[in-house]
Image: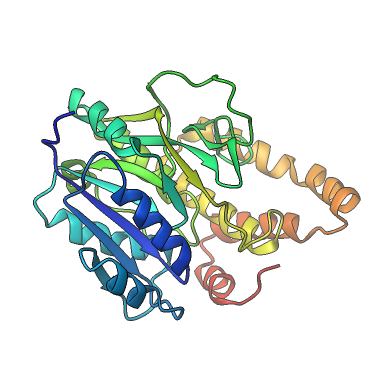
Amino acid sequence: MKHGSRVSTVILNWNRKDYLLECIASVKAMDYPTTEIVVVDNASTDGSAAAVKATCPDVTVIENDKNYGAIGGKNIGLRYAINTAVDYIFMVDNDIVCSVDALSKLVSIADEDPDAGMVGSMMYDHSKPDIILSAGGIIDYTQNVSRGRGDGEKDIGRFQNVEEVDYLWGGALLVRKEVLAKVGLFDEKFVGYWFEDTDLSVRVHKAGYKVLFNPHSKVWHRPHAVIEQFSFRKKYLATRNAIRFMKKHANKRQWIKYLGYAIGGLPFAFIRDLVVCRDVRGVWGKAKGLFDGLFNRQRAIERVLNSNFKK
């Protein structure tokens, strides 16, 4: 393959030194060379920035003065890359390991189709390498607004073709620089790390570009274990972000559908969690996230975001 298009790789990091170094090594081992590897370090305290400088002097390290969060940190890297002489930006999370041809498979699709605004990889579970974590997503405006395709499935070849999807997860994503310049970066009013990539995908669609999933570009991801699946904090922030997404993009019919599922599903979720988990904090988090999001209770949202309350 000719390496005509220039690509900047942007990796966000916060206190994951070992994962970060493994991620960088996999990026360097890819068969498509990147013009520049940029690590944005969100004020880590584990020596991440120093370790990168010592072992990878060719990598550009941006050391933030504080933790700007996942979305703010990514945007700092994107702003830097947009101002360099590249055609594409490859966004990679620090807990990702890329296959040798992960980037070349993405660039080849983008180069062939000038309407391709974003191209995303097939993502697998690092600890279970044949289990799919992300094959693009569908926005169906049901209880959680959107859902991933193939999440948790064993890869038996169901996804074989490059195809358009409603959204892509930002963990391993190639974006055309001119598209970001047109539609803007991630919306930093989303809190935590939910729906910012869905929102960006929709904005790219609305600008007239394609959002493409390429199953032949493969990466492996270590799933986040910071917040439990049914914790108050996770459900609260995810639901609050869902409401923000709805306010930006949904029409009346989609609102009716979503609220019917979301509100109508609360009693069932309460009974399920009470019986199965014996813990209803997740349901309470979702209900409160709905209320605070719908009525723009920003101070309440900030209290949850800034608290150390993980459960």
When the figure is inspected, residue 105 is found, relative to residue 48, above or below; the finding is above
Q: Position of residue 196 (x, y in %)?
A: 42, 51
Quadrant holding the N terminus: top left
- Horizontal placement of 269 versus 80: left or right? right
Way the structure is coloured: rainbow
Which residue is at a point 42% across and 76% down the rendered structure image? 44
Residue 114, percent from left and from top: 17, 27
Q: Nearer the viewer, residue 193 or 57?
A: 57
185 left or right of 141 in image = left
Could you tell whether 4 is left or right of 301 in the image? Answer: left
Foreground pick, 206 / 30: 30
| Residue 161 coordinates in the image, percent (x, y) | 41, 18
Q: Is the residue 17 above or below the residue 90 in the image?
A: below
283 and 126: which is toward the camera: 126
Give the residue drawn at x 64%, y 56%: 235
Kindly tell me whether residue 226 is visible in this rendering: yes
**Residue 104 picture quarter:** top left
Taking the view exactly as shown, the residue that stands out farthest to the right is 275
Residue 208 visible in rendering: no
User: 7 above or below 131?
Assistant: below
311 or 134, which lies in front? 134
Q: Which of the 4 image quarters holds residue 152?
A: top right
Residue shown at 49% from the left, 44% from the top: 220
- Total marks drawn? 0
At 38% from the left and 77% from the top, the residue drawn is 43
Quadrant containing the C terminus in the rendered view: bottom right
| Figure quadrant of residue 162 | top left
